[in-house]
Image (spheres, helix red, strand yellow):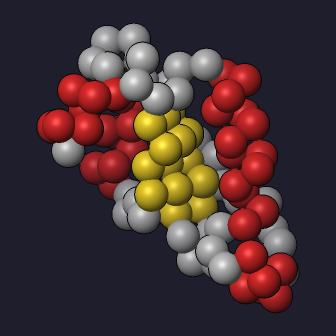
Amino acid sequence: MSTTPPTTDAAKLADGWPYWSILVVDDEPGMRNFLVKTLAPRCQTVMEAGSAEEGAELLRGNHVDLIILDIALPGMNGVAWLKEL
């Protein structure tokens, strides 16, 4: 799980996402890393998971405003998990 690096509130407000929490679910570490590094400076919290099962575990204990979900995942695919949600 990743959280945003410290940034100023003014910088967050300028981008318009200061209090969002985002969950990135993708089995490709490179894509997850890219999305986390891109989103982290712009919002309050960015979490990451490598599978739908890991994502579901994070959702049990955390509020999430937005999920970025890959369709092709190991185990339960993204479409099946979306239907479950």
Q: In the rendered image of this protein, does residue 36 appear above or below residue 26?
A: below
The quarter of the displayed image where residue 3 is located: bottom right
Residue 82 position, x and y percent, is 25, 38
Residue 17 position, x and y percent, is 63, 74
**Is residue 76 shown left or right of residue 32?**
left
| Residue that sits furthest to the left in the current view | 84
Q: Quadrant of the N terminus?
A: top right
| Residue that sits furthest to the top in the current view | 74
The quarter of the displayed image where residue 61 is located: bottom left
Residue at horizontal 81%, vertical 68%? 6
Residue at horizontal 72%, vertical 23%? 30
Q: In the rendered image of this protein, does residue 82 appear above or below residue 30?
A: below
Residue 70 position, x and y percent, is 46, 29
Residue at horizontal 55%, vertical 48%? 47
Q: Quadrant of the C terminus?
A: top left
Q: Nearer the viewer, residue 26 or 46?
A: 26
Residue at horizontal 60%, vertical 54%? 46
Q: How many marks?
A: 0
Residue 40 position, x and y percent, is 72, 57
Q: Nearer the viewer, residue 68 or 3?
A: 68
The quarter of the displayed image where residue 8 is located: bottom right
